[in-house]
Image: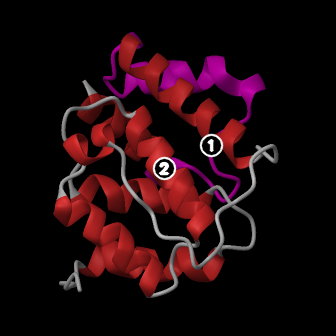
Amino acid sequence: MAENVLDVLMYLFETAGDDGVPPEANRAGLREELERAGFRAGEIDRALEWLDGLALRRGDETHEPPTERAIRIYGRDECVRMDAQGRGYMMYLEQIGILSAHQRELVIDRLMALDCEEIDVDDIKWVVLMVLFSQPGEETAYARMEDLVFEDRTWVAH
């Protein structure tokens, strides 16, 4: 299920213009385009809910963002779904300055919202790209992440 939702999200991401995903008012046209591309209604609904969750979390000012020196302790469900390699990759992205602590939390939230049993490094890469793309002023971090995704550099967890 989640891979299908991620497929829909990746399709939207790759076909979005400079403005990103079309606004709420254009959801009917977006739905039709996705159906023509071969995606099922359930997958489309879950992908649009995922995008709504991203928009809500991005604008959520009620929680104090973690400090840059905060250490992330993953919960049991997060550890089950994201193995040590995935968690190490998240730490790597923070260490090289692509993700801030606040963005890390947003990425983890969106990864967990995929509602899949296993999350691999490729899933993390695409969700990080989508999160960074959705945030104004993150063009440099996005470009660096895009290099990592498309050049498929090897990385080492420390």
Residue at the (37%, 34%) spot, across then down:
114
Label 1 vs label 2: CA separation? 7 Å
> Residue 100 location in percent, x, y?
58, 72
Residue at the (20%, 53%) spot, across then down:
120
Which residue position is annotated with label 2?
A: 13
> Residue 33 location in percent, x, y?
49, 26
Q: Is 147 one of the magenta-colored residues? A: no
> Residue 28 location in percent, x, y?
63, 17
- Say if mark 1 contacts mark 2, CB within 8 Å: yes
Seen as rendered, the residue at the extreme top is 41
Q: Tell me the kind of residue under disc 2.
A: Phe
* Quarter of the image that includes the N terminus: top left
- Can residue 101 be seen in the rendering of this structure? yes
Residue at the (58%, 62%) spot, across then down:
103
- Can residue 132 be seen in the rendering of this structure? no
Of 116 and 19, nearer the camera is: 116
Which residue position is annotated with label 1?
A: 21
Q: Is 30 one of the magenta-colored residues? A: yes
- Magenta range is 13-41
